[in-house]
Amino acid sequence: MTAPLTRLKALPAATANNGEGSIAIGGWFVPLIPLATLLIFLLGAAPVAFAHKPSDSYLRLTPRDSGWQGRWDIALRDLEYAIGLDQNGDGDITWGELQGRESAVVQYALAHLRVRSSNGACNPRPGALQVVEHGDGAYAVLDFALLCPSAGAQTLDYQLFFSLDPSHRGLLRVDAPSGTETAVLSPAQSQRMLNAAPAGGGRQFLNYWEEGVWHIWSGFDHILFLLALLLPAVLWWENGRWRPAPALRAVVLETAAIVTAFTLAHSLTLTLAVLGVVDLPGRLVESTIALTVLLAALNNVFPVVTARRWLLAFALGLIHGFGFAGVLRELGLPEDTLALALAGFNLGVETGQLAIVAVTLPLAFALRQTWLYRRLALPVGSAAVALLALVWCLERGLNVPLLSAFAARDTPKPILASRALLPNLSTFTTPPDQS
């Protein structure tokens, strides 16, 4: 049988609390369970809500005399959504099923990648299809050659999955004799000049800054971790209850300490991981990140760390740096501008964090004394985050689909998944010249 490649103390009774501007968390936790569970399944209508990692593919190009040699890593879960790989519908994608759809995979991928110069388009010639494991699951690996009519500047046009998922990104790495260049391809920036003058340090810095911003904004687990830390920042713990903070200054100082501690923590481990000083397995990192979200959310419901919560942000934030490092390793770091790329990515993450704080903090401060915040946002929101993080821990640690499978099951296939509608690209299946 072919192995699958992916898979996809008792509490007190609830009591009313009539204290103005305060909440007894323990007494409210019993009704929070069904409310938080309902919230998660309502979110399940949008599968992207459960994606701890955005949709990415990894495209690597190396110049050759006749054109380019390429390697393209594409997530099986994305291919399943686009063209259908799970032929028996059991939720698993086996090697046999992938082999059965190899021609469709090659045709679909190369139909969404074009390289052309002023003298015409480069002709793609695919090689063997393989499978590799990334930190977030199994990927199909397509080796191919691009035979180009002439040398000189060429334009790459990347369109994979953009019509199905505008949040998808193509992470491009070009290994040229002049050095390694990287780029993030998106619907807004889907084209890239090849064989042009190497990008300067400023351009590389900006590229990695954009990737840092994008990663924190699209990383649902990182956002929930930050929000779990920020929710009680407008409150203070006294006599077993969360009470509204009296002054904005104290809230700003508390928030600044938390965000700074988180930044220092993930910057430290990101640097250590990128330099190869510390290296952790991807599955362990992703599972532990989910655990940090769980612990941060539970601390809001059952407060243990109520003072100097920046220490909690620092301790738990250390593991997030290893997650960021995994993204950078996949993207590829240019050796000649390593420091600039690392600084750009770090500042991008920090920019993304500050944008989240700028939106969240004023709203939380304005609502901190209301029933909505004290009875819903903090307790129910934290309980929902904790339950979702627990599911992530199980999914990532055991590699079994839970909520993600539920969301995928109820998501209709796009029209492009129809095999009859695949483009007629039979010339793409010609094996590469081995001479």
Image (spheres, helix red, strand yellow):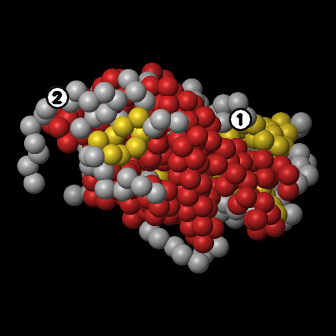
Q: Is residue 132 above or below residue 112?
A: below
Where does label 1 land, which residue?
190
Q: What type is the residue that disc 1 sits on? A: Ser
Report x, y in % for residue 338: 75, 65
Q: Nearer the viewer, residue 56 or 109?
A: 56
Q: Which mark is residue 16?
A: 2
Please report the residue visible at 44 percent of the width from the left and 25 percent of the height from the top. Answer: 367
- Position of 323 with respect to 368 (left or right) is right
**Disc number placed over residue 155 in the picture, else none:** none
Residue drawn at 8 percent across, 49 percent down:
10
Please give left or right for residue 334 compared with residue 434 in the image. Answer: right
What is the quadrant of the N terminus in the image? bottom left
Question: Based on the displayed image, in which of its 4 quarters is residue 265 positioned?
Answer: bottom right
Instruction: Answer few, some or many: residues within 10 Å of disc 1's Cα (few below 14, many 20 plus, some between 14 and 19).
Output: some
Secondary element at tag 1: loop
Image coordinates for residue 292, horizontal then vertical, percent: 39, 56
The Cα atoms of the two marked residues, 1 and 2, are separated by: 56 Å
33 displayed left or right of 289? left
Q: Position of residue 172 (x, y in %)?
A: 68, 50
> Which one is in front, 421 or 51?
51
Q: Nearer the viewer, residue 344 or 156?
A: 344
